[in-house]
Image: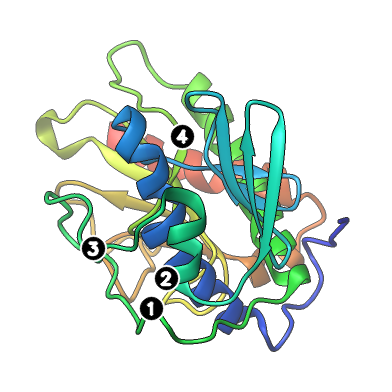
């Protein structure tokens, strides 16, 4: 479904986002991880899901769970996290990977979820926008950068990539989050791994050490894509200086 990325956020957005995060972490990512040992997700036209793995794609489209398997497509309406996990992989588990630093806190897996179709599409559009900007930044990285893939991480539910050499604190995470407990609306961020000049007003985040540019900031821009890239690039150049 089509969605206007730069419209005002609907009142249902935060609840939909939080419930989709539960599905991403406890249902979709484990299905991929169990089979190929990778957990990253990707934006889709109407939401998000896995890249292809062993002939399968597990994804959310609007208010539906969708499982493609060697050309066959099965769907199921979103109800609760346990049902979603069972749909994609046959089992619900609170712990499916032991080494998360900050795994998502589960809700009761039998709680009825509330996900609006338009909110899912909006989150997919935000992830697509953020991933495009991140990939432009990745292509502009310096020769000595260790540049990671841009992907949606299930524990944080954000599209992110890492750039910069780790020595001298010059490496950082660059990402696009649909919002969280610290910043309610979608936002881009730069999160340095080491020390940075806290007196520089660029580093404006209040809920973590770094900088944010919000969906509201970008809505007021005549060219959101360029402003988003310039924001990420400004953080990169500060850390490389």
Report the Cα–Cα distance between label 3 and label 4: 20 Å
Q: Secondary structure at mark 3?
A: loop
- With 172 as the anchor, is 140 left or right in this view? right
Q: Quadrant of residue 8?
A: bottom right
For the C terminus, the quadrant is top left
* Residue that appears at 19% across and 49% down: 97
Say what secondary structure mark 1 lies in: loop
Q: Which residue is mark 2?
A: 82
Disc 2 element = helix
Q: How is the image coloured?
A: rainbow
Q: Nearer the viewer, mark 2 or mark 3?
A: 2
Question: What x and y, as percent, mark residue 101?
Answer: 15, 57
Q: Are there few (<14), some (14-19), or many (20+) residues within 10 Å of tag 1?
A: many
Rendered view: 234 above or below 80: above
Query: What's the CA distance linking mark 2 and mark 3?
Result: 17 Å
Q: Position of residue 16 (x, y in %)?
A: 60, 77
Residue density around tag 2, few if under 14, some if 14–19, many if 20 or more, within 10 Å: many
- Residue in the image at 12% along x and 51% along y: 98
Q: Nearer the viewer, residue 85 or 152?
A: 85
Disc on res. 103: 3
Circle 1/circle 2 CB separation < 8 Å = yes
Residue 241 shows in the view: no
Of residue 181 and residue 124, the one placed in the foreground of this image is 124
* Residue carrying label 4: 150
Q: Is residue 40 above or below residue 37?
A: below
The answer for how far apart the CA atoms under marks 1 and 2 are is: 5 Å
* Vertical position of residue 15 compared to residue 229: above or below: below
Task: Give the residue number, with chain letter if any, for mark 1.
Answer: 109
Q: Which residue is located at x 55 percent, y 28 percent?
A: 52
**Looking at the image, is mark 4 or mark 2 nearer the viewer?**
2
Q: Residue 216, how many percent across, how many down? A: 66, 72
């Amino acid at each position: 479904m089509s969605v206007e990325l730069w419209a005002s956020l609907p009142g249902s957005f935060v609840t939909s986002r939080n419930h989709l995060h539960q599905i991403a972490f406890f249902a979709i990512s484990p299905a991929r991880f169990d089979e190929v040992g990778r957990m990253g997700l990707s934006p889709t036209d109407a939401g998000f899901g896995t890249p292809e793995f062993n002939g399968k794609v597990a994804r959310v489209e609007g208010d539906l769970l969708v499982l493609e398997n060697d050309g066959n497509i099965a769907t199921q309406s979103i109800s609760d996290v346990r049902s979603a996990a069972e749909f994609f992989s046959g089992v619900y588990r609170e712990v499916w990977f032991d080494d998360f630093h900050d795994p998502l806190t589960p809700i009761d897996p039998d709680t009825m979820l509330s996900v609006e179709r338009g909110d899912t599409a909006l989150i997919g559009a935000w992830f697509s926008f953020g991933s495009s900007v991140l990939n432009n930044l990745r292509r502009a990285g310096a020769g000595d950068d260790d540049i990671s893939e841009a992907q949606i991480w299930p524990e944080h539910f954000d599209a992110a990539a890492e750039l910069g050499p780790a020595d001298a604190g010059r490496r950082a995470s660059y990402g696009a989050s649909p919002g969280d407990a610290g910043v309610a609306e979608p936002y881009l961020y730069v999160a340095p791994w080491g020390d940075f000049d806290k007196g520089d007003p660029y580093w404006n985040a209040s809920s973590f050490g770094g900088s944010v540019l919000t969906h509201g900031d970008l809505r007021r821009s005549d060219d959101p894509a360029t402003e988003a890239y310039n924001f990420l690039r400004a953080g990169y150049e500060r850390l490389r200086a």
